[in-house]
Amino acid sequence: MSAHELKLVNPYTESVIGFVPLLQDSEVNGVVARARNAFRAWRATFPGERAALCARFCDVFRSRSEQIAADITAQMGKPLQQARNEVNGMLDRTAHMIAIADMTLADEWLPDKPGFKRYIRHEPLGVVVDIAAWNYPLLIAVNVVVPAVLAGNAVIIKHSSRTPLCGEAFADAFAAAGAPEDLVQSVNASHDVTEKLLQHSGVDFVSFTGSVRGGHEVSASVASRFIDVGLELGGKDPAYVCADAPFQYAVDNCVDGAFYNAGQSCCAVERIYVDRSIYKDFVEAYCAKTKEYVLGDPVAASTTIGPLAQAGSGGFLAQQVEAAIRDGGRLVVSSKDFQMPETGWFFAPTVVVDAPQTTSLMQEESFGPVIGITPVSGDDEAISRMNDSPYGLTASIWTADYERAVRIGERVETGTFYMNRCDYLDPALPWCGVKDTGRGATLSHYGLLKLTRLKSMHLRTEIPG
């Protein structure tokens, strides 16, 4: 391995599976120049042509889905069936964005005014850089890449160093679908080279999904330029289980919401508040359901939780759990309840109850298969604790009372509020957050419009005599 290569390691076998080239400092200008050339031609195309390209992209991606899913599993450890689910979910999101693009991007005509024609255009920005994360390497990237192309932009994907093959999958599929040369490019780069890319005068928009620290770094990189940045920086998403909740349904979904993809999701359930009247029963049922998980080879059909994608993540999770126990929490599910694989970067599903609200487990994003559960005495206490967080991506309530859900949802500081579901993105709704979760939005017509700029057309058609 040289300084010009990125080494890929399988998190289950811990063996090297390949190398990919790294973009060099001297190559940044060329990448951006090629993107700008592609943009100049692409911006002149009609919406139907853009939609047709994205539809063909879907066809190509679907034809390669098994290999792409296998690559996801090899790169970041996601169980193979979950990787297949991600491919299908990405195709569904693409289909929705294609369906709404024509109406969303159409000119907006104002009411008639004698002697004038007035309308608002939604013009493409230019070159969009998408820095995508590894945990849902297709679903995160597609939120920006396809809408950007539909809006008339060129795209440079800088995927995570854990999942670079997913960035290449997007670029290759667009090329095979007949996209103009360099309309969608994939690059792999070090931190320093990425910063140079972001600061390039030919870049018009940057989207970043990752940590709060990374979001600050991206914002600082472009601070000297008047371009927008979209930031999706994670969460510490709460669930509130009411006394009238559909009990077993709430248990099953709160378990899945916490441990799917080994808990490596920005919108995973990371803390649960349960009405005191059902608390004991909920904890008992939650622990029983958690213990059904099977850790192992992510390619095996029996595996329901794979290894962590990053070797060092387990240490942080262990620290959170240990601190919560020191402060009064009780460990009720741990690695002792599972058969642990002999190889791989595994961390067993872990449940801690009664941890104080001030502990790291209840305050700081875990991004792994650990969960804290505590009792609350009613709606007001639940809302207070749900809002006691520097994050605000999603929150969920589990209740049979729709009006109650609306009342509580309107008071919870979050980008998305769920009733009786969690850990899901509806492409018709904007994906956004508050506080340290970031700014901007992807998906829905708002996400499409975010990748355009406004132009007011104010045309006098009659000269006063």
Image (cartoon, rainbow, N blue to C red):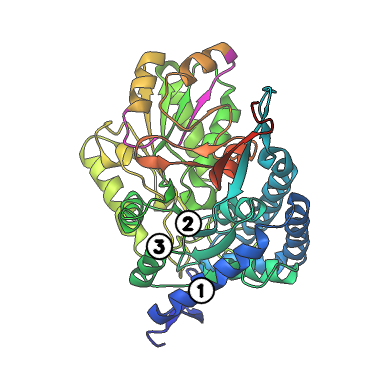
Q: Residue at x 48, y 61 (%)?
A: 307
Which of marks 2 and 1 precedes in the sequence?
A: 1
Residue matched to label 3: 198
Q: Secondary structure at mark 1?
A: helix
Q: Position of residue 142 (x, y in %)?
A: 60, 54
- Marks 3/1 in contact by CB < 8 Å: the verdict is no
> What is the CA distance from the residue labelled 3 to the residue labelled 1?
12 Å
> What is the CA distance from the residue labelled 2 to the residue labelled 3?
9 Å
Magenta portion: prevailing SS class: loop
Q: Nearer the viewer, residue 391 or 262?
A: 391
Task: Classify mark 2: residues with Cα within 10 Å, few (<14), some (14-19) or many (20+).
Answer: many
Q: Position of residue 222 (x, y in %)?
A: 35, 56
Q: Which residues are magenta?
A: 388-402
Q: Residue at x 78, y 56 (%)?
A: 52
Select label 2 or label 3 by which is in front: 2
Amino acid type of the residue that numbered disc 1 sits on in the rendered structure: Val
Residue matched to label 1: 31
Question: Which quarter of the image is occupied by the N terminus?
Answer: bottom left
> Which mark is on residue 204?
2
Which of marks 1 and 3 precedes in the sequence?
A: 1
> What is the CA distance from the residue labelled 1 to the residue labelled 2?
14 Å
Q: Nearer the viewer, residue 209 or 194?
A: 194
Q: Is residue 300 visible?
A: yes
Q: Is residue 69 visible?
A: no
Q: Position of residue 242 (x, y in %)?
A: 49, 19
Q: Residue at x 75, y 43 (%)?
A: 99
